[in-house]
Image: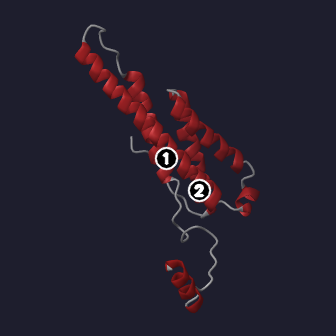
Amino acid sequence: MFKKVASKMKNWFPAEEIEAHCDGPCGVYDPASARIAAEAVLSMTKKITDLQLPDGKDSEAITAYVNTISRYIAIKEQQAEIAKRELLILWTDYFKPEHLEKYPDLHDIFWRAAKLCSGCKVEVNLEHANKLMASIKKIHEIFWATKDRDVAWYTAS
């Protein structure tokens, strides 16, 4: 019954058809969110590689170690997924054919950055975490160049 009423309401009060060139208002895109997530990946990777395995006879220390490393790994993987999602949104929703004309390697840059995100999720590799940051820096530079703006690259750490 509710469906019949809702259907009649739609017929009586049709929604105005609208068109948009993107998912949200212009200006909502920014590679900063990918940078922040990638910085967390880099930070957690450093923390994981710096964490010292305790003496095998100290059960409290081993428990604390396992808890800490588990948390670092969970954060690293979560943030790598966030960075990947943010990059994919920027790649698929913001960039347009005219950007590809000016930056013909744009697809390759994004594809490699997304693959680095995946790699950083499944491994502990400081070199790859640093390459991810470098890739996002390049994307940052291209993104702001498309808006004719010079926005400084900075990191929180």
**Inter-mark Cα distance, 1 to 2:** 12 Å
Amino acid beneath label 1: Ile
SS for callout 2? helix
State how the image is colored: secondary structure
Q: Residue at x 31, y 21 (%)?
A: 65
Residue ID for mark 1? 82
Q: 73 or 139: nearer the eye?
A: 73
Q: Position of residue 102 (x, y in %)?
A: 73, 57
Q: Position of residue 76 (x, y in %)?
A: 44, 36
Residue at left offset 27%, top offset 23%:
64
Q: Where in the figure is residue 112, as x and y percent of width and height?
A: 65, 40
Q: Position of residue 90 (x, y in %)?
A: 59, 56
Q: Which mark is residue 93?
A: none
Q: Is residue 54 above or below residue 89?
A: above
Residue 143: quarter of image: bottom right
Residue that numbered label 2 is attached to: 90
Left or right: residue 33 compared with residue 111: left
Nearest to the observer: residue 84 or residue 139: 84
Height in image: 56 above or below 2?
above
Give whichever of 93, 155 is nearer the camera: 93
Total labels drawn: 2
Front position in the image: 10 or 132 = 10
Which residue is depicted at the point 62% across and 81% down? 18
Instruction: For marks 1 and 2, give the one nearer the viewer.
Output: 1
Precedes in sequence: disc 1 or disc 2: 1
Q: Residues within 10 Å of mark 1 (few under 14, many from 20)?
A: some
The residue positioned farthest toward the front in the image shown: 1
